[in-house]
Image: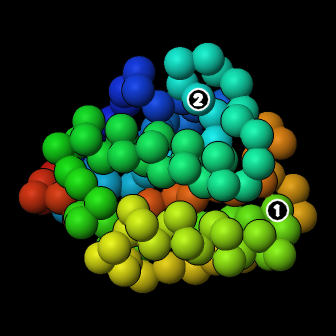
């Protein structure tokens, strides 16, 4: 296993890592709309979705991967009424159409309106 960390994505808000590789997969912790340059949450669903995706992209790049390596996402929305707006932006980045779950969450950390977690395929093999 290898821990993935980059200054180009927000630091973890708790006792977890930005990402971990294991058994040929990269697991990226849920990313929200925090701008890593300022440490602040951007405003609105559209901006938070774009920033969450930029954060994911930075972690993927740190691991030597791209959006085309993503095989599964789990998406959390504070309000499912924002789904159409979220989905349009999501589709611009994840054009390879990975498997996905998308649910409404009663509350998300740090005031997030959107949070996305990712599983991507790597060339790594399990070291167990």
Above or below, 75 relative to 112:
below
The residue pinned by badge 1 equals 78
* Residue 34: image location, x then y, percent: 63, 34
Mark number, residue 35: 2
Would residue 73 be seen by someone viewing this image from the given angle?
A: no
Identified at 70% across, 35% down, the residue is 42
Above or below, 41 relative to 105:
above
Q: Residues within 10 Å of mark 2 (few under 14, many from 20)?
A: some
Q: In this image, 94 relative to 80: left or right? A: left
* Residue 113: image location, x then y, percent: 77, 54
Mark number, residue 37: none
Where disc 1 sits, the SS reads: loop
Above or below, 72 relative to 38:
below
* Residue 17: image location, x then y, percent: 48, 36
Identified at 84% across, 68% down, the residue is 79
- Residues at marks 2 and 1, CA–CA distance in whole angstroms: 19 Å
Would residue 13 be seen by someone viewing this image from the given angle?
A: yes
Q: Tell which circle, 2 or 1, labels the residue nearer the N-terminal end.
A: 2
Where disc 2 sits, the SS reads: strand
In the rendered image, the quadrant that contains the C terminus is bottom left
Identified at 68% across, 77% down, the residue is 84
Q: In this image, 98 relative to 23: left or right? A: right
* Closest to the observer, 125 or 120: 120
Q: In this image, 47 relative to 58: left or right? A: right
In the rendered image, the quadrant that contains the N terminus is top left
- Report if the CB atoms under discs 2 and 1 are less than 8 Å apart: no
* Closest to the observer, 92 or 124: 92
């Amino acid at each position: 296993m290898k821990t993935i960390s980059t200054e180009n994505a927000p630091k973890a808000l708790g006792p977890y890592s930005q990402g971990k590789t294991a058994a040929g997969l990269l697991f990226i912790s849920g990313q929200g709309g925090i701008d890593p340059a300022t440490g602040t949450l951007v405003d609105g669903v559209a901006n938070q979705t774009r920033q969450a995706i930029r954060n994911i992209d930075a972690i993927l790049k740190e691991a030597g991967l791209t959006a085309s390596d993503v095989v599964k996402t789990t998406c959390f929305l504070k309000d499912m009424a924002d789904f159409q707006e979220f989905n349009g932006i999501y589709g611009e980045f994840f054009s390879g159409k990975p498997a996905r779950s998308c649910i409404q969450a009663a509350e998300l950390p740090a005031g997030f309106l959107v949070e996305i977690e990712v599983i991507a395929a790597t060339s790594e093999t399990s070291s167990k």
